[in-house]
Image (tube, helix red, strand yellow):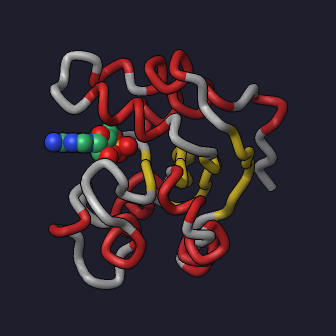
């Protein structure tokens, strides 16, 4: 089915100037960018986005990292977009990520891991709504 997923290019990858290279991975693999914005998240915005991880030991470091610089946030649309984006990203820990994946090629560590992608269509809907009012999403 045609799906949508939320993608974030994290501060490490924005600082490395590889937004375009990562966008090409999406476009070359049938994912269309149908909404996008660059933002420097406030602490409150980052904590709200990652609220499901609030009790995890890595939460504080994750939030600190995500507010350390601007991020590029986009909605990707395509056949099986959620899984396709996760395949393109590779494992959360770049040391475990398969060769040729975004994290293997651009990421340093489990915190500075270049990209975020929704883990299921239901989460994608919540995450997309967090950043984009429906009128700012441009499907076909
Ligand atoms: P992301 O897909 O953005 O979702 C939560 C983030 O927490 C994850 O990517 C990692 O960057 C970060 N993180 C740090 N430590 C861990 C961990 N042990 N397990 C999962 N995610 C972690």
Residue 11 drawn at (x, y percent): 53, 51
Please give left or right for residue 18 compared with residue 61 in the image: right
Q: Quadrant of the C terminus?
A: bottom right
Left or right? Give the position of 88 relative to 92: right
Where residue 113 sits, quadrant-wise, is: bottom left
Vertical position of residue 94 compared to residue 82: above or below:
below
Name the residue located 63 percent from the left edge and 66 percent from the top edge.
19
Q: Position of residue 91 (x, y in %)?
A: 24, 61
Residue 119 shows in the view: no
Quadrant of the image occupied by residue 84 = bottom left
**Nearer to me, 51 or 68:** 68
Q: Is residue 104 left or right of residue 35?
A: left
The image shows residue 116, relative to residue 43, as above or below, that is: below
Q: Residue at x 35, y 68 (%)?
A: 103
Q: Which residue sits at x=28%, y=18%?
A: 54
Total labels drawn:
0
Q: Is residue 98 visible?
A: yes
- Percent across and percent down for residue 10 are 50, 51
**Where is residue 90 shown, x and y percent of the image?**
30, 66
Which residue shows up at 18% across the image and 69% down it? 95
- Relative depth, front residue between 101 and 84: 101
Report ligand 1 position as a quadrant: top left
């Amino acid at each position: 089915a045609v799906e949508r997923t939320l993608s974030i290019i994290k501060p490490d990858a924005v600082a490395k100037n590889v937004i375009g290279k990562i966008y090409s991975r999406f476009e070359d693999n049938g994912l269309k960018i149908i909404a996008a914005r660059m933002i420097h998240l406030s602490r409150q915005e980052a904590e709200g986005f990652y609220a499901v991880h609030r009790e995890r030991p890595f939460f504080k470091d994750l939030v600190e990292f995500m507010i350390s610089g601007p991020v590029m946030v986009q909605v990707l649309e395509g056949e099986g977009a959620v899984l396709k984006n996760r395949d393109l990203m590779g494992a959360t820990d770049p040391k475990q990520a398969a060769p040729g994946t975004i994290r293997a090629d651009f990421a340093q560590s489990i915190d500075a891991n270049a990209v975020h992608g929704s883990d299921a269509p239901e989460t994608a809907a919540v995450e997309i709504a967090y950043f984009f009012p429906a009128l700012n999403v441009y499907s076909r």
